[in-house]
C-alpha cells in the first residue's frame, strides 16, 4: 500500500516538472527561469535546495550520536552561507546580469580563472549529487522491503530526477520545489508531533537530550584539536558553499534584486529553524525506542542513517508513513534536481563554451541536456561505489570550493586590486595545499581544508601584490556593470 502511494507521488512530481518544462524557450529560461520568480517561489527554491537527504537522515542521526557539537556544518554553517551570500553577493550578481557563477570569474579575471574555478565547482557537485542519489536509493530500497538491491534502487531514483530536470531545467526545479516544500513542511511537522507523543511529549525529549549532553555546542574540556575540527566543518559549509552554482541560480532567478536578497535570507532562516525538526524526530525516536541505539555500533557508518526510516516503518500508522516518506522524497528530489542542473550549467557555459565560441542557443540547450545525462552517470558511479555517510560526502564536496573558489570570489567583488595572477595563485595554492595536507597530514590538529583555505588567502595576496608575470585578463566590477550584455531571450533590463 505504502509503495503505491510513493510511486503515485513520484509520478505527480514528474508530471509537475514536465508541465513546467513548457515554459522553456531558451537557455536563460533553462538555467535561471528567465529571471522571473516571485518572492514565495524564490524562498521555496532556496529552502528546498538546501533541505535535502542529509538534513533529514544524516544530520539528524549525527546529532543523535554526537549532539550539537557534531553538526557545526549543517544546519549552522549552511544557514550562515545563505545569509552571507544574500548580503555580500546577491545584488552584485543580479546587476552583473550573469548566466552562471563562472561568468563572474570570466569577467573579473579572464578565461584561465573561469575554467579552473568552474572545474573545481563542478567537481564539488559529485559528492553533493551522489549524496542525494544514495538517499533516494536508500528510501526506495527500504520501501521495497528488500525486493530491490540497494544499488538498483539508487539507479531507479537517479532516473526519476534526470527525467524531470532534463526537459524543464530551472523552471521544473522551481515548480517542483514549491510543491515539495509544502509537502516537507506539513509532513515532517505531523510526524514530529506523532513521534513526540510516542516518546512522552516534547518536554521529556528535550529533558532527555539535555541530560545526555546533546544540547551542548562547545563541550567543556574540548581540546584545541576539537575546536579546529569544528571550525573546519563550519567553514566548509559557511564559506565553501557560497561559490556554488545552485546558490547563484536561486539568487539570480528572482524577478528583481530585492527579491533575490530577501528570498535568500528568508529561505536560509526557514531552513535553519526547520532543520531542527528532523533532529527532534530522530532524538524522540531514540527516547521512544532505546533499542535503535544499536544502529550506532554498526561498522558501516551509513547504517545510522536508517534510524528514522526504520522507526517510521516499524511504529507509525500508514498515514504517517505516507507523510514521512512523501516529505523525505520531496527533500531529496528537490535537492537532487538542483544538484544536477548546477554543474551542468557551469560545465557547459564556462568549461566547454570558451572552446566552442560560436554555439547558438538551440545547440546550447541540446548540449546542456547531454552534459546533464553525462554528469548524472558520473555521480551515479560515485554513489554506488562510496561508503561515506551523506553528511561526510556533502562536507567533502564543499572543501573543493572553499579552497579553490571562495577567495577569488570575495577578493574579486571587494578588492579593486585583485587580479588574474592573484586568482591563479590562490586557486593553485589553495587546492594544492588542501589535497597535499589531506594525503600527508589528514589527522593533524588543523584540518586540511582550513590549511588549504589559509593558503588560498596567502596566494591571493602574494599573487596580486607581487610584480606581474601573468597579465591581468579581467576588468573591474564597474567596467563589468557598464558593459552588460542582455542574456539570450532577454530584452533590455527588467
Image (tube, grey):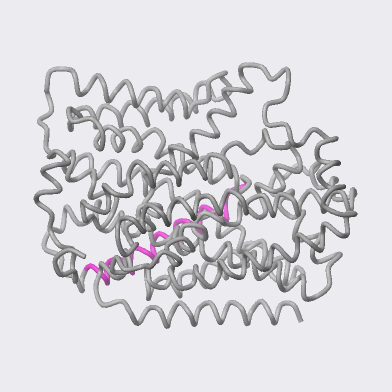
Specify the segment rendered in magenta.
Answer: 364-387
Asked whether, in this view, residue 422 is left or right of residue 263, the answer is left
Asked whether, in this view, residue 42 is left or right of residue 76, the answer is left
Tell me, yes or no, whether the highlighted magenta stretch contains residue 455. no
Q: Is residue 33 above or below residue 16?
A: above
Return the x and y of residue 211 as percentages of the image width and height.
85, 35
Return the x and y of residue 479 as percentages of the image width and height.
10, 43
Q: Assign the magenta stretch its main secondary structure.
A: helix
Q: Is residue 446 above or below residue 392?
A: above
Q: Is residue 188 above or below residue 387?
A: below
**If the image is split into quadrants, where does the N terminus sit?**
bottom right
Which residue occupies 65% across, 71% down? 326
Question: 74 or 353, which lies in front?
Answer: 74
Return the x and y of residue 64 as percentages of the image width and height.
76, 43
Q: Is residue 359 above or below residue 260?
A: below
Return the x and y of residue 410 as percentages of the image width and height.
31, 35
Question: 298 or 33, which lies in front?
Answer: 33
Which residue occupies 15% across, 70% down? 491
**If the image is split into quadrants, where does the C terminus sit?**
bottom left
Which residue occupies 19% across, 45% down? 106
Tell me how many marks there are: 0
Determine the image quadrant of residue 454. top left
Determine the image quadrant of residue 75. top right
Asked whether, in this view, residue 303 is left or right of residue 445, the answer is right
Amino acid at each position: 500500500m505504502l509503495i503505491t502511494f510513493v510511486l503515485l507521488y513520484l509520478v505527480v512530481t514528474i508530471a509537475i516538472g514536465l508541465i513546467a518544462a513548457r515554459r522553456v524557450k531558451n537557455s536563460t529560461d533553462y538555467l535561471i527561469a528567465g529571471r522571473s520568480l516571485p518572492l514565495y517561489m524564490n524562498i521555496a527554491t532556496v529552502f528546498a535546495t538546501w533541505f535535502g537527504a542529509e538534513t533529514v537522515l544524516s544530520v539528524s542521526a549525527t546529532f543523535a550520536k554526537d549532539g550539537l557539537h557534531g553538526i557545526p556544518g549543517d544546519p549552522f554553517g549552511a544557514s550562515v552561507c545563505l545569509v552571507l551570500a544574500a548580503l555580500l553577493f546577491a545584488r552584485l550578481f543580479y546587476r552583473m546580469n550573469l548566466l552562471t557563477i563562472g561568468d563572474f570569474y570570466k569577467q573579473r579575471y579572464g578565461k584561465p580563472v573561469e575554467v579552473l574555478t568552474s572545474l573545481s565547482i563542478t567537481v564539488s557537485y559529485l559528492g553533493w549529487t551522489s549524496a542525494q542519489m544514495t538517499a533516494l536509493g536508500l528510501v526506495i530500497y527500504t520501501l521495497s522491503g528488500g525486493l530491490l538491491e540497494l544499488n538498483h534502487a539508487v539507479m531507479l531514483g537517479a532516473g526519476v530526477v534526470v527525467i524531470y530536470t532534463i526537459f524543464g531545467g530551472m523552471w521544473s526545479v522551481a515548480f517542483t520545489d514549491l510543491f515539495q516544500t509544502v509537502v516537507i513542511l506539513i509532513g515532517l511537522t505531523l510526524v514530529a508531533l506523532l513521534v513526540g507523543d510516542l516518546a512522552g511529549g516534547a518536554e521529556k525529549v528535550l529533558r532527555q537530550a539535555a541530560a545526555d549532553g546533546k544540547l551542548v555546542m562547545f563541550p567543556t574540556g574540548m581540546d584545541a584539536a576539537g575546536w579546529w575540527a569544528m571550525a573546519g566543518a563550519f567553514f566548509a559549509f559557511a564559506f565553501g558553499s557560497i561559490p556554488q552554482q545552485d546558490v547563484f541560480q536561486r539568487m539570480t532567478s528572482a524577478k528583481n534584486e530585492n527579491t533575490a536578497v530577501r528570498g535568500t535570507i528568508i529561505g536560509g532562516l526557514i531552513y535553519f529553524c526547520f532543520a531542527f525538526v528532523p533532529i527532534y524526530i530522530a532524538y524522540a525516536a531514540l527516547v521512544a525506542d532505546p533499542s535503535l541505539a544499536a544502529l550506532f555500533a554498526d561498522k558501516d557508518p551509513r547504517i545510522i542513517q536508517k534510524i528514522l526510516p526504520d522507526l517510521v516503518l516499524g511504529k507509525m500508522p500508514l498515514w504517517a508513513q505516507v507523510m514521512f516518506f512523501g516529505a523525505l522524497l520531496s527533500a531529496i528530489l528537490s535537492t537532487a534536481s538542483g544538484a544536477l542542473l548546477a554543474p551542468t550549467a557551469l560545465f557547459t557555459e564556462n568549461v566547454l563554451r570558451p572552446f566552442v565560441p560560436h554555439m547558438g542557443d538551440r545547440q546550447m540547450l541540446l548540449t546542456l541536456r547531454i552534459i546533464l545525462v553525462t554528469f548524472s552517470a558520473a555521480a551515479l558511479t560515485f554513489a554506488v561505489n562510496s561508503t561515506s555517510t551523506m553528511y561526510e560526502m556533502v562536507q567533502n564536496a564543499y572543501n573543493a570550493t572553499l579552497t579553490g573558489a571562495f577567495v577569488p570570489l570575495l577578493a574579486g567583488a571587494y578588492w579593486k586590486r585583485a587580479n588574474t595572477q592573484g586568482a591563479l595563485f590562490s586557486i593553485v595554492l589553495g587546492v594544492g595545499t588542501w589535497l597535499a595536507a589531506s594525503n600527508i597530514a589528514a589527522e593533524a590538529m588543523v584540518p586540511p581544508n582550513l590549511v588549504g583555505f589559509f593558503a588560498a588567502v596567502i596566494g591571493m595576496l602574494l599573487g596580486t601584490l607581487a610584480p606581474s608575470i601573468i597579465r591581468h585578463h579581467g576588468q573591474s566590477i564597474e567596467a563589468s556593470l557598464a558593459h552588460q550584455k542582455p542574456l539570450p531571450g532577454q530584452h533590455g533590463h527588467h
